[in-house]
Amino acid sequence: MKNDTSSVLACVTGQFNCDRIIKTAKQIADDCDCELRVLSVLKQTSDYSKVAEQIEYLYRVSKSVGADMTVLFEDDAPKATAEFVENNNVTRIVTGMHDGKCDSFIVKFNQLLPETSISMISKDNMVYSLDLCRCYS
C-alpha cells in the first residue's frame, strides 16, 4: 500500500555514527513539514550479530525523534531503497557522504530515481544537497 504523506528518508548503515544522519534528517523533515522515516538495508547473511547492537541503537535514536525505522535484508541497497522511496512518497533521502566511487550507493540510487533530492551529511555535520533543477524556456 502506498503512503500519501510526504516524507524524508534517513538512509543508515550498521554504524553508531549514523545517528547524525537521523538527527539531521529530522531537522530537514521538520523544515519541510514532512514525516521522517529511517531505512537500513543490510546485505543478506547468516550472522547479523556484528551489527545487531548498532541497529538497535539506531532504532532507539529513530524512536526518540518520532520516526519509524525499517530494516530490509537485500543485497541491492540502491534498488531496495528506490522501491521504498516510491512506495512511501519520499521527497528527499538523507545519507552519509558519497565515497567517490562510480558504483556507490548514491550514484546507483540517483540513476534509478534521478528526480529524488539527496542530502549528504558529513562527519562534521555539514549538509550537502543535490536537488533537481528544471530549466524553462
Image: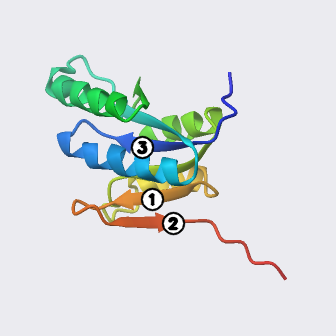
Place of residue 54 in the rendered image (x, y in percent of width and height, measured from the top left) = 19, 31
- Asked whether the beta carbons under mark 1 and mark 3 sit within 8 Å of each other, the answer is no
Query: What is the spatial separation of the Cα atoms under label 2 and label 1, in whole angstroms?
Result: 6 Å
Q: Residue furthest top?
A: 46
Say which quarter of the image contains residue 87. top right
Of callouts 1 and 3, the N-terminal one = 3
Q: How many marks?
A: 3
- Name the residue carrying label 1: 119
**For the residues marked 3 and 2, what is the alpha-carbon distance in whole angstroms?**
15 Å
The span from disc 1 to disc 3 (Cα, nearest Å) is: 9 Å
Is label 3 in contact with label 2 (beta carbons under 8 Å)? no
42 left or right of 115? left
Q: What amino acid is at disc 1? A: Ser
Report the residue at 48% width, 42% height from top.
9
- Rendered-image quadrant of the N terminus: top right
**Residue 11 got which mark?**
none
User: Which residue is drawn at the image coordinates 44% and 55% (left, top)?
Assistant: 106
Furthest-right residue in view?
137
Residue 10: image tag: 3
Q: Earlier in the sequence, mark 2 or mark 1?
A: 1
Q: Amino acid at mark 2?
A: Leu
Instruction: Give coordinates of residue 111: x percent, y percent.
Output: 56, 55
- Whether residue 82 appears in this view of the structure is yes
Q: Are marks 2 and 1 in contact (CB under 8 Å)?
A: yes
Mark 3 residue element: strand
Q: Which residue is mark 2?
A: 130
SS for callout 1: strand
